[in-house]
Amino acid sequence: MAAQKDQQKDAEAEGLSATTLLPKLIPSGAGREWLERRRATIRPWGTFVDQQRFSRPRNLGELCQRLVRNVEYYQSNYVFVFLGLILYCVVTSPMLLVALAVFFGACYILYLRTLQSKLVLFGRELSPVHQYALAGGVSFPFFWLAGAGSAVFWVLGATLVVIGSHAAFHQIEPSDGEELQMEPV
């Protein structure tokens, strides 16, 4: 009992690891590893949103340098900003939620059907790729009615504006060996 409490205190002191926070629905493989790497390289959110670190670039050269360096430095943070905008778009659009429910419901029905026996349509056995294409075809009208195309372009545009403005106006984080940087005369 005391050992469990010590382990809990150690876990709280270290913070939760990326593996404990990842949903169980994400299968192990390349996608899960990529997401774990993103979470491991995330920069502190305090420095990411520190208002004192924002200023207008002096010239076009500094603007370009800020864009490149900040995108490299805050890459993982920007990925989570993008995922947050996707989540916001889905949650605030009830019809898009219905379309997603139809798609995942069709996928789940096909999954349950294949557990019982192979899915045969018009005398031909359907491969998993064809089954998911069938689920997409069934749910396509719902995505079209929900305006999924405009939602995709809204997310892309909002991401470009948010990330682009942050990268352009956030001062560059000093890296090792670059503290003594000379300015052009």
Image: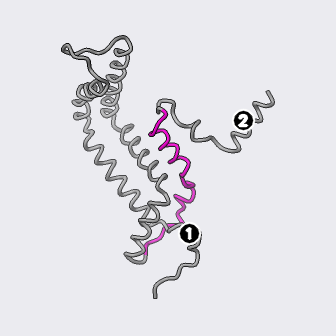
Residue type at mark 1: give it: Pro
The image shows residue 178 at horizontal and vertical percentages of: 56, 73
Give percent across and percent down for residue 47: 56, 59
Q: Does residue 85 lie above or below 128 as drawn? A: below
Q: Label for residue 97? A: none
All told, the count of numbered labels is 2
Residues rendered magenta in the picture: 28-57
Q: Residue furthest bottom?
A: 185
Dot 2 lies on which element? helix
In the image, residue 126 lies in the stretch drawn in magenta: no
Indicate whether 73 appears above or below 103: below
Amino acid residing under circle 2:
Gln
Q: Main secondary structure of the magenta part?
A: helix
Query: Magenta stretch: residue 37 in it?
Result: yes
According to the picture, the residue beneath numbered tag 1 turns out to be 174
Q: Is residue 5 left or right of residue 37?
A: right
Estimate the x, y position of residue 24 in percent, counting from the top left. 51, 30
Residue behind mark 2: 8
